[in-house]
């Protein structure tokens, strides 16, 4: 007999123990199983991330971000399932809890659709290794060097110094210019009076010399031939494969060296000429 708030309450401790002990034991087993599942899930995620880090070009920091995200999602999911299961073991109604969780999730879904879309898109950008820091990419009308990749947005530094913040949900198409070797392309114009074959031979000889001096050139440079017949000039194209992000350096070096080679060979590069005619006007006094 137990007195509570002035009332005599009869408690059958044996009956309480008979009902509580199985629930307590089951709860302990559920918690242990949940901890084991959580450890296994973390190990699986870690191995998957290592696999992605080995074969993708995403940075190590981005891979760790994905690992943290996946681990958090799995841990909170297991925790929620454990709480609901343990409450049911003690005959606590969980329908209200599940309904509340559904309402909260629905509210978050409507109120943060853009954020969810950013996170989902950012997740695939990271896990698939589509972009990495220092890549040269084009997203829509923006081109530049990637400075940061997060689950919410992409930061691109334009060549004029502007920093663009692009939410991941706005990335409908993305071009990565930094995967593999790049191509350097230079067009040189000569006059119609010049010998095309002689000019091409001079250019190719200079290209061969440049190749020996530039470690950034992977293949070429090669004179591919006449690219265009203009109104006053003939355009000859030269192409080369270069190391990543070195195409502009190689193009500048080619233009300078090829111009000097044509000057030495006496081959004219056409440029606009202006003829001024002065007409003498006689004035009668």
Image (spheres, rainbow, N blue to C red):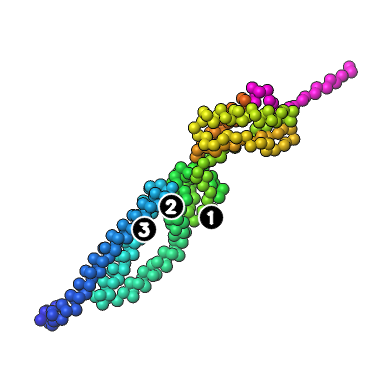
Dot label at residue 253: none
Circle 2: element type: helix
Look at mark 2 in the image and give the residue it sits on. 126
Which SS class for mark 3? helix
Q: Mark number for residue 172?
A: 1
Which image quadrant is residue 102 in? bottom left
Position of residue 53 measured from the top left corner of the image (x, y, whole percent):
39, 50
- Considering only vertical position in the picture, is 163 above or below 235? below
Question: What residue lies at 59% left-to-right and 37% top-to-bottom?
Answer: 239
Residue placed at 33% from the left, 72% from the top?
97
For residue 101, above or below residue 121:
below
- Earlier residue among tags 3 and 1: 3
Of all residues shown, which one is farthest toward the right? 284
Percent across and percent down for residue 140 are: 55, 50
**Magenta span: chief secondary structure:** loop
Up the image or down, 142 lies above or below 85; here it is above
**Does residue 280 appear left or right of residue 27 in this picture?**
right
The residue indicated by pointer 3 is: 70
Which residue is situated farthest in the top direction here? 285
Distance CA(mark 2)–CA(mark 1): 16 Å
Q: Quadrant of residue 277?
A: top right
Q: Position of residue 220 (x, y in %)?
A: 56, 35
Q: Residues within 10 Å of mark 2 (few under 14, many from 20)?
A: many
Q: Is residue 156 magenta?
A: no
* Magenta-drawn segment: 262-285
């Amino acid at each position: 007999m137990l007195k509570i708030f002035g009332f005599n309450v009869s408690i059958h401790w044996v009956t309480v123990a008979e009902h509580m002990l199985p629930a307590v034991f089951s709860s302990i087993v559920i918690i242990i199983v949940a901890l084991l599942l959580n450890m296994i899930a973390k190990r699986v995620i870690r191995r998957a991330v290592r696999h992605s880090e080995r074969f993708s070009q995403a940075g190590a920091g981005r891979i760790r971000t994905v690992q943290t995200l996946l681990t958090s999602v799995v841990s909170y999911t297991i925790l929620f399932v454990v709480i609901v299961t343990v409450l049911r073991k003690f005959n606590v109604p969980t329908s209200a809890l599940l309904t509340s969780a559904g309402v909260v999730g629905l509210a978050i879904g409507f109120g943060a659709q853009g954020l969810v879309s950013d996170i989902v898109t950012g997740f695939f950008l990271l896990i698939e290794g589509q972009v990495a820091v220092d890549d040269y990419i084009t997203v829509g009308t923006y081109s530049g060097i990637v400075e940061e990749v997060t689950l919410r947005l992409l930061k691109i530094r334009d060549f004029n110094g502007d920093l663009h913040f692009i939410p991941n949900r706005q990335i409908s198409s993305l071009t990565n210019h930094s995967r593999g070797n790049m191509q350097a392309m230079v067009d040189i114009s000569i006059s119609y009076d010049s010998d095309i074959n002689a000019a091409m031979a001079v250019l190719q000889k200079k290209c061969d010399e440049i190749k020996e001096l530039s470690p950034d050139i992977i293949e070429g440079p090669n004179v591919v031939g006449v690219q265009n017949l203009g109104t006053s000039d003939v355009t000859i194209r030269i192409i080369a494969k270069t190391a990543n992000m070195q195409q502009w350096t190689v193009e500048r070096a080619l233009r300078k060296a090829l111009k000097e080679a044509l000057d030495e060979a006496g081959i004219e590069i056409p440029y606009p000429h202006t003829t001024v005619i002065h007409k003498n006007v006689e004035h009668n006094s």
